[in-house]
Amino acid sequence: MPVQESFERIMDETLGYPQAERECAIRLVSSEPMEKFYRHPWFSRWNVSSDAYSTSWKIWLNQAIVAAAADHSARRQALDEQRERISRLSAVLEEAVNLFAEIEDAEGTAPILLPAELSSAFDLMDAAGTNSGIVGAQERAGYELYSLPLLLPIRRAEGVAHFIPSVAHMLSALSLSTELLDTQLADRKTIPWSYQSDQDIFESQKANDQRAYVRHFDRHMRFLRSEFRGSKAGEPAWRLPDSLLALQCKVALDLPELDGFVDRLRKHRLRVEDL
């Protein structure tokens, strides 16, 4: 068994591997369908040296298990909640921009002296950078000792020739940026994902464990491609054939026999040119 050593490490209770990963490891090592997997001639390309052979199988087992044991439900919920927050923020900022404009229009007639922080970006930065209720002592010291001296020459030069956007301008810019983001978040195909791997998992409206599995596995195997030996033209050694990955996925996720499973997984896989 090429993964016996790695399997024994995972099963060592003193190392603290999660139960889900240990159960997956047992299926991948002991299930009857995997006997054909381990004996498949495709893996002979990994056997270019004893070190490379061992490394390739260690990487394979680790990625096969991690991809299966990953629980994406909490992050999927967090994604939906963040989209809702940004949508609400966009609406609030739009209202704030309109209110700000009304306040500025009424300034000449309403007998109220508005604080400088409502108009000058510099005064607003001072208010934020020196307020202990907003920033910590270290941030305040950094602002007063280092940032403020750099800002003073710019502030003194402020005028028509040295235009500095006002607080109203900045609020409008923030509102427009948030509105654009809210528009992007309305369609999962245009969401600015933190990482490409997040798009692999969450671009689909509904959770799909099989899609998440093969894309996670493909991307991370490719990321570690320098550890694999025995690539052939058009057949990188890190990329398992569709039939082998389908067998592995079915066992790792503890799935029943499914018609057309290889073809289904082939559609979910990442193309080499997209990685």
Image (spheres, grey):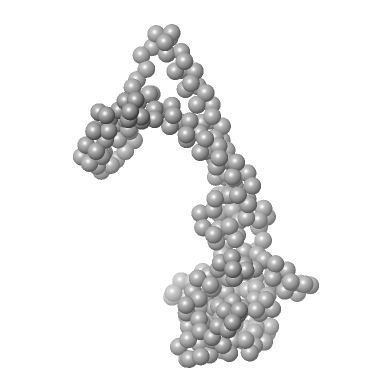
Q: Position of residue 16 (x, y in %)?
A: 46, 71
Residue at the extreme front: 161
Viewport quadrant of the C terminus: bottom right
Q: Is residue 96 above or below residue 215?
A: above
Relative to 151, is 2 on the left or the right? right
Left/right placement of residue 178 relative to residue 162 reads: right
Residue 210 image offset from top left, x and y in percent: 66, 66
- Taking depth in this image into account, of 208 and 142 the one nearest to the observer is 142
Image location of residue 81, percent across then percent down: 57, 45
Is 132 on the left-hand or right-hand side of 223?
left
Q: Position of residue 26 (x, y in %)?
A: 59, 79
Number of numbered tags placed on the structure image: 0
Q: Please determine whether, in this image, residue 140 is positioned above or below residue 20.
A: above
Q: 154 or 220, which lies in front?
A: 154
Q: Is residue 11 visible?
A: no
Q: Is residue 252 above or below residue 175?
A: below
Q: Quadrant of the N terminus?
A: bottom right
Taking depth in this image into account, of 65 and 189 the one nearest to the observer is 189
Q: Residue at x 47, y 35 (%)?
A: 174
Q: Residue at x 25, y 28 (%)?
A: 156
Locate residue 158: give its quadrant.
Answer: top left
Question: Quadrant of the rendered structure where residue 131 is?
Answer: top left
**Residue depicted at x 62% and y 64%:** 212
- On the question of residue 218 being in view, the answer is yes
